[in-house]
Amino acid sequence: MAQLTITINARTNNPPNQLGFRQINLVHNELYTFTEEDFTTLTIPPYQDPEGDNASLLKITQLPAIGQLVFNSIVSSVNDEYDFTDIGLGLLTYQADIGTTISYTDANFEFDIADIGSAIFSGLTDGKIIFKVSPYENLPPTQVGNNSVTINYGETLVFTRALLTTLLTPAYSDPEGDPAGDLLVQVVPVTGVLQVNGIDILNNTIISFDDIDAGLFTYVPDNSIIILDAVDFDFQIADTGSNQFVG
C-alpha cells in the first residue's frame, strides 16, 4: 500500500518586534512605581509582538544616570531581569534624586522585553524611559492662627517665639518643617505701641524672629487708659525656607 508522509514544521515564535519610549514627569524627590503599561501600551510606539504574545520579562540594559532604580528594596544593576508579574505588584520603582534641587532630565534608562511565547528578548535598542523632574519647591507655612494674652495695667509685653507660633490656634506649621523666619506686622494696635529694640514700628514692618528670640519685640500699652482695654494687631509669618508670608 502506498503511503504519503506529511511533515509539519514546528511553529516559529518570534520575539517582540517593536519597543518604544515613554516620558514620565515627576516632582523633586518623588518615588515612582512602575506598571507593566509603562513599558508596553504607554510607550511610543507601543510594545508589539508578531504573534500578539504578552510581555513576559523586562531586562535592564542601561540604568538611570541621576535617580535610582530599585526592585523589591534592592538597587538594580545592568542586565537584571524582572518578571512582569512582579512589576505588576509594584516592586519596581524609580527614586528621583533628592540631592538635585534644580529641574533635570534623566534619559539614560533603557530596557528590553521578552514575550511569553518565545521567551527571547527583542534585542532592540528603542526601549527607553525618560524622567523629567521638576525643581525643589519650598512651600510657605500652611497654618498661622490667632492668639490672645492678658497683661496688667502698666506692664510691657515681651513677645516670644512660642507666643507667635506654637501657642497660636491653630499653631504655626510648615510643610517642610521650616521654622518661622520673619514676622510682618500688617496693622499696628490702635492704642499703645509695638516696638523693636525700643523704637516704635509702623504698619507693614518686618521683624526677624532672631530679634523676637532676643526679647526685642514688645508691646507698650497706653497708660492714660485706666479702664479695661483690648487691642489687637494683624500679622503674617514667613518660614525660613520659602520666605513667603502667610497669615
Image: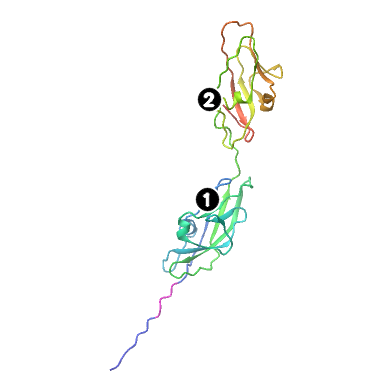
- In this rendering, would 91 be left or right of 165? left
Q: Is residue 10 magenta-colored?
A: yes
Q: Which residues are magenta?
A: 9-13
Q: Amino acid at mark 2?
A: Thr
Give the quadrant of residue 135. Answer: top right
Identify the residue shown where x is 58% and y is 48%: 133
Query: Element under label 2?
Result: loop
Question: Disc 2 marks which residue?
Answer: 169
Is residue 188 or residue 152 the one in the foreground? 152
Farthest residue to the left: give it: 1
Above or below 121: residue 219: above
Q: Position of residue 230 (x, y in %)?
A: 56, 12
Q: Is residue 2 above or below residue 142?
A: below
Is residue 38 shown left or right of residue 165?
Answer: left
What whole-number distance in Å separates the C-alpha atoms at marks 2 and 1? Answer: 37 Å
Residue 40 placement, left or right of 187: left
Three-letter residue code for mark 1: Tyr
The percent coordinates of residue 71 (x first, y second) are 53, 57
Of residue 247 and residue 161, the one placed in the foreground of this image is: 161
The nearer-to-camera label among 2 and 1 is 2
At 45% from the left and 63% from the top, the residue drawn is 55
- Which quadrant of the view contains residue 181? top right
The label shown at residue 32 is: 1
* Image location (x, y in percent) of residue 164: 60, 24
